[in-house]
Image: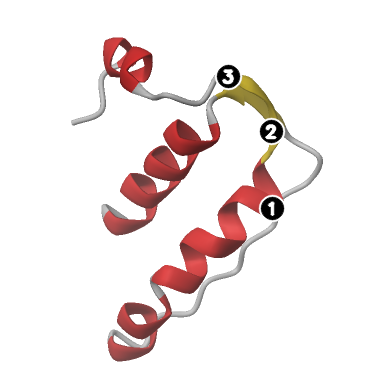
Amino acid sequence: MLLPSSFDDFEDPPTWLALGPALSPVLENYQVLIKKRKLRLDVKVGEERVWMSREALGMVLSNLISNA
């Protein structure tokens, strides 16, 4: 489980990050599993941005996709 207090453990500082560019490499990492399970993803990300470290955002998105 990723707790808010664990965000302090990441070395890179928080900054404004766009979700779309951060999501693309995470989805690439799951392509084999997506194909194996014959899943179809319809990803629509607008201009949303979040304030967090790049490493933390990658972990949050990865957890979200792996738990879906």
Residue placed under numbered mark 1 in the picture: 21
Q: Pointer 3: residues within 10 angstroms few (<14), some, or many (20+)?
A: some
The reply, left or right, for residue 53 in relation to residue 34 is right
Q: Amino acid at mark 3?
A: Pro
Give the image location of residue 63, x and y in percent.
32, 46
- Measured in 3D between alpha carbons, the distance from the residue under mark 1 to the one under mark 3, in whole angstroms, is 16 Å
The reply, left or right, for residue 6 in relation to residue 40 is left
Residue 58 vs 29, above or below: the answer is: above
What residue is drawn where x is 65% and y is 43%?
Answer: 19
Q: Quadrant of residue 23?
A: bottom right
Q: Quadrant of residue 49?
A: top right
Comes first in the chain, label 1 or label 3: 3
The reply, left or right, for residue 49 in relation to residue 33 is right
Split into 4 quadrants, where in the image is the C terminus? bottom left
What residue is drawn where x is 38% and y is 51%?
Answer: 62
Residue placed under numbered mark 2 in the picture: 17
> Considering the numbered disc 3 on the image, is that residue within a helix, a strand or a loop?
loop
Give the image location of residue 47, x and y in percent.
81, 40
- For discs 2 and 3, the disc positioned in front in the rendered view: 3
Residue placed under numbered mark 3 in the picture: 14
Q: Amino acid at mark 2?
A: Leu
Mark 1 and mark 2 residues within 8 Å of each other at the beta carbon: yes
